[in-house]
């Protein structure tokens, strides 16, 4: 198995085999990232394809200050955001009212990530992006606001709405499981 | 929800995606690979474009440099060629800077502002030759290693200003290269040529400053001295031909300083004698010539060149430098002449000279000022024949007088001074080396290289081919245009047929009746016949024709016409039979039968009341005409001329009343000729319709060559017909 440095050097030389190896190593994880920012698998694959082209183009400038996976993930997120910016331009994010959150803690333990992806994909466009950036990628609201060109309050409200929606969805799923006694996934 | 809970919720989500993987479809990599290929091709294109641009820039730069180089070389070649044809010395009066370079590279600078002539050599000393108030300064800078001799002449044109000039000669010594810079501090001018001469490469002519004129010449004749008139200074050292002497003369005629310098080492080694004569004459009568010559400084100069000369010239060499200025010819004899001859060891010969030759450093100052050009001998001759001479600076102030130089023998500096001139002479020994030294300055051949014939430009050839192809294509178009043109002109009319008619009038010319002996009936009734012959009438014709164009403008036409000539005349006679039972209209035919003296004839001419006779003659004419096209366009104008063969058909005389008609047909009894010939002449104005039709209006004239009547009748009638026809022409091709 090729090491990360070998992959990087091979890709820097433009070796197609090394590029294929790099793709095979990270394409599955990166597709999950793309799925979180997209509404469908096809859209996610388009983002994945475009992002990997950017990876191979920009790997010459990769200074290896971070892990390769982190660097590729950042490229995936940025590519996904660029793909979503058109939609955000059409449907700009605005402040939304915070929904009533369920008082009980909602646990997602035992829920398969595919269901979580579906839940995230079911979120509104703005909520989906802000939730991914804040909850999963770990950006602050300020960084999100700067990156998306929105206000920090809008980012917070979008996240709160996304969180509420997810909690409602998770609560519904929990009730369903409890009622019918089916095992959680 | 508190922060802990919030963080817990987010971390739960984040943890839920740790290690999550989804297999993408296979076409993702396929499409990705296609994108990468496309990107690579784009990069390759960009790279190729970059290389193309670089190549184009390189080629452009190379072409530009080649062009500039060619221009410089060609201009220099022209300049050298122009200067080669000029005398040995070139004087630039405008800048007063003259630079003369021989293959040994000599540089002479004339500075207008300065009137000093300083001659300095820097190998082991310097020699200054100052002459005031002419105040000419001549610097001879010689680089021994390079065999370069430069002479910087500052020849002043204004004596007054020269008085204010202060001569300063600086000699820069290097280890093996001597540089001498003659500065005229008063005029703040620096002769750069002298400074340039030091780093100058052997055999290479340094580019002078803009104020200098560079002349590079090669000498092949050695005996003829070089002279420069006026204030020009020529310093020449040649290293090529045998028995070569280079004379630098400044014409002035007054005083002259003859300086002869020899390289003992070189010359004695080769058994040659070399002489450097310098003649300087002041412009003013009271000019004082201070000549400061330092042997050690001159000697390397000569040494370098003489070594080169010695290698190449076994014969005697002579370098004469004459500087002449001023008008006082009386001073000519007071010129300083220093002459040394190694072979003869005649020493210096200077009748009234103040010039030190080669062994002394003579510094001159005028107006009593002492100019010290003391240059201790520092330079060491690199040649094996090193110069041991050392000269001390001599400050000599002279006015109007030149101290004679006492021949001091070899290596002896003689300083002649008058007035407060101080002269110091110090003998120095010169180590002679009998060895010949290799030429320091390789002979340089100046060749005029003509530019090669430029190869045909492939781009131009391509354009030429394109032009030919275009012309060919235009040829097709031209054919169409030609067809179009033919539509508009008669170009395309080669063969045609025509049909038409004509109408006109005719009259008989040269008509008359003569008695022949057999025409008694006509002759006896000539008056009656004359009425018919003098009648004029109308002519009509209709016919078809055929035409062919034989040349560009000539055509031949023919055809067949049916022609009718009608005329009326009055008569008061009739021809009756024997019993006068029937009367016939009188005509040539009936009169021909009414011969009263013929017993067999029963016809008699009788008088009747006047009546009108209608005469109708029918012919078939076959015209043949040649035509010339005056205008051969859509509207054509044509001149026709030809011959018509007229075949007689019949003649009918009709009368009214009791007088019956008579008809005469072709036969033996007919008074008309069966065949008659007529001349045709006319014009034809036509207009072309479409490609094959042309309508022509043909006014013309017909004139019979002979009488239409038989000669036996004795009747002359040559009808002249004028008609105008209208013909429709069909053009076959």
Image (cartoon, coloured by chain):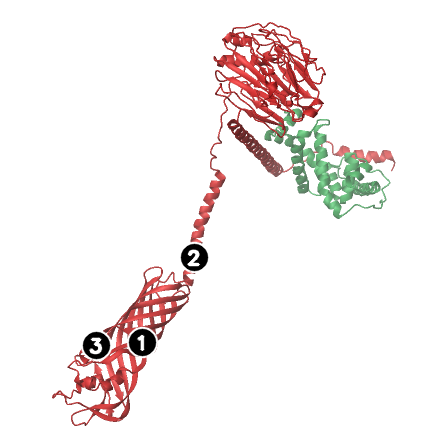
Task: Name, please, the residue furthest toward the right.
Answer: B2
Q: Secondary structure at mark 3?
A: loop
Separation of residues labelled 1 and 3 (CA atoms): 18 Å
The x and y percentages for residue B510 are 26, 77
Q: What shade does chain B have?
A: red
Circle 1 residues within 10 Å: few <14, some 14–19, many ≥20: many
- Foreground residue among A37 and B499: B499
Please count the marks in the image.
3
The x and y percentages for residue B203 are 55, 19
Q: Is residue B601 left or right of residue B151?
A: left
Chain for numbered disc 3: B
Q: Where residue B312 is drawn, which disc sits there?
A: none
Q: Where residue B480 is drawn, which disc sits there?
A: 2
Q: Where residue B721 is drawn, which disc sits there?
A: 1
In green, which chain?
A
Determine if marks 1 and 3 fall on one subunit: yes
Separation of residues labelled 2 and 1 (CA atoms): 44 Å
Q: Is residue B166 left or right of residue B218?
A: right
Chain for numbered disc 2: B
**Rendered image quadrant of residue A165:** top right
Q: Is residue A135 above or below residue A89?
A: above
The x and y percentages for residue B390 are 63, 8
Q: Which residue is mark 3?
A: B673
**Rendered image quadrant of residue A134:** top right
Quadrant (top left, top right, bottom left, bottom right) of the C terminus of chain B: bottom left
**Rendered image quadrant of residue B679:** bottom left
């Amino acid at each position: 198995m090729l090491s990360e440095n070998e992959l990087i050097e091979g890709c820097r030389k433009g070796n197609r085999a090394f590029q294929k190896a790099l793709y095979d190593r990270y394409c599955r994880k990166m597709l999950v990232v793309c799925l979180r920012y997209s509404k469908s698998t096809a859209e996610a694959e388009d983002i994945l394809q475009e992002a990997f082209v950017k990876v191979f183009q920009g790997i010459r400038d990769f200074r290896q200050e971070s892990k390769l996976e982190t660097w590729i993930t950042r490229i995936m997120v940025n590519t996904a955001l660029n793909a979503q910016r058109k939609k955000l331009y059409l449907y700009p994010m605005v402040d939304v009212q915070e929904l009533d959150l369920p008082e009980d803690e909602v646990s997602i333990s035992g829920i398969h990530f595919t269901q979580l992806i579906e839940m995230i994909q079911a979120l509104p466009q703005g909520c989906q992006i802000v939730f991914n950036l804040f909850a999963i990628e770990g950006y602050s609201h300020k960084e999100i606001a700067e990156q998306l060109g929105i206000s920090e309050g809008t980012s917070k409200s979008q996240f709160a709405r996304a969180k509420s929606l997810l909690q409602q969805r998770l609560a519904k799923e929990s009730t369903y499981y409890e009622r019918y006694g089916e095992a959680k996934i | 929800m508190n922060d802990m809970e919030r963080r817990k919720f987010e971390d739960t989500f984040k943890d839920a995606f740790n290690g999550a993987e989804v297999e993408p479809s296979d076409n993702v990599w396929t499409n990705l690979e296609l994108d990468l290929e496309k990107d690579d091709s784009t990069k390759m294109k960009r790279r190729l474009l970059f290389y193309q641009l670089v190549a184009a820039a390189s080629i452009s730069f190379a072409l530009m440099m080649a062009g500039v180089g060619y221009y410089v070389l060609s201009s220099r070649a022209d300049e050298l060629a122009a200067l080669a044809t000029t005398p040995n010395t070139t004087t630039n009066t405008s800048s007063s800077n003259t630079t003369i370079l021989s293959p040994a590279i000599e540089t002479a600078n004339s500075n207008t502002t300065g009137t000093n002539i300083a001659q300095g050599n820097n190998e082991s000393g310097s020699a200054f030759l100052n002459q005031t108030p002419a105040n000419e300064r001549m610097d001879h800078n010689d680089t021994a290693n390079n065999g370069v001799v430069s002479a910087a002449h500052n020849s002043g044109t204004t004596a007054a200003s020269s008085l204010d000039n202060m001569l300063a000669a600086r000699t820069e010594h290097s280890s093996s290269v001597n540089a001498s810079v003659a500065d005229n501090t008063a005029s703040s001018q620096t002769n750069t040529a002298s400074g340039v001469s030091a780093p100058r490469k052997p055999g290479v002519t340094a580019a002078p400053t803009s104020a200098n004129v560079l002349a590079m010449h090669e000498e092949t004749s050695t005996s003829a001295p070089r002279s420069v008139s006026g204030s020009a200074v020529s310093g020449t050292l040649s290293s090529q031909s045998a028995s070569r002497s280079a004379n630098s003369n400044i014409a002035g005629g007054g005083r002259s300083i003859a300086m002869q310098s020899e390289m003992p080492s070189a010359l004695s080694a080769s058994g040659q004698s070399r002489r450097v004569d310098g003649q300087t004459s002041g412009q003013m009568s009271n000019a004082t010539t201070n000549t400061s010559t330092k042997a050690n400084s001159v000697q390397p100069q000569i040494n370098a060149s003489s070594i080169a000369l010695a290698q190449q010239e076994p014969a005697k060499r002579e370098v004469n430098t004459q500087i002449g200025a001023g008008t006082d010819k009386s001073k000519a004899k007071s010129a300083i002449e220093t002459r040394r001859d190694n072979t003869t060891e005649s020493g210096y010969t200077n009748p009234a000279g103040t010039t030190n030759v080669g062994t002394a450093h003579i510094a001159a100052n005028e107006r009593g000022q002492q100019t010290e050009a003391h240059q201790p001998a520092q330079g060491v001759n690199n040649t094996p024949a090193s110069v041991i001479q050392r000269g001390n600076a001599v400050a000599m102030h002279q006015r109007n007088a030149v101290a004679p130089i006492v021949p001091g023998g070899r290596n002896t500096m003689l300083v002649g001074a008058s007035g407060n001139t101080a002269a110091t002479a110090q003998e120095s020994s010169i180590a002679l080396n009998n060895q010949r030294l290799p030429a320091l300055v390789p002979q340089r051949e100046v060749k005029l290289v003509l530019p090669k014939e430029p190869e045909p430009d492939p781009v131009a050839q391509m354009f030429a081919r394109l032009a030919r192809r275009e012309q060919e294509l235009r040829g097709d178009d031209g054919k169409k245009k030609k067809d179009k043109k033919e539509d508009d002109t008669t170009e395309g009319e080669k063969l045609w047929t025509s049909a038409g008619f004509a109408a006109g009038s005719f009259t008989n010319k040269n008509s008359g009746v003569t008695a022949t002996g057999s025409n008694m009936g006509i002759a006896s009734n000539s008056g009656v016949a004359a009425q018919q012959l003098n009648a004029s009438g109308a002519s009509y014709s209709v016919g078809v024709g055929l035409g062919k164009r034989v040349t560009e403008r000539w055509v031949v036409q023919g055809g067949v016409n049916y022609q009718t000539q009608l005329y009326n005349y009055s008569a008061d006679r009739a021809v009756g039979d024997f019993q006068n039972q029937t009367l016939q209209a009188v005509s040539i035919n009936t009169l021909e039968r009414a011969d009263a003296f013929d017993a067999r004839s029963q016809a008699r001419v009788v008088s009747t009341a006047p009546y009108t006779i209608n005469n109708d003659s029918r012919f078939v004419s076959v015209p043949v005409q040649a035509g010339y096209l005056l205008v051969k366009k859509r509207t054509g104008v044509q001149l026709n001329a030809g011959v018509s063969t007229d075949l007689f058909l019949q003649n009918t005389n009709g009368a009214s009343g009791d007088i019956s008609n008579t008809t005469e047909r072709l036969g033996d009894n007919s008074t008309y000729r069966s065949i008659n010939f007529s001349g045709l002449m006319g014009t034809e104005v036509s207009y072309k319709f479409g490609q094959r039709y042309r309508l022509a209006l043909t006014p013309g004239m017909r004139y019979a060559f002979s009488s239409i009547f038989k000669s036996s009748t004795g009747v002359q009638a040559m009808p002249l017909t004028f008609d105008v026809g209208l013909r429709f022409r069909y053009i076959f091709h």
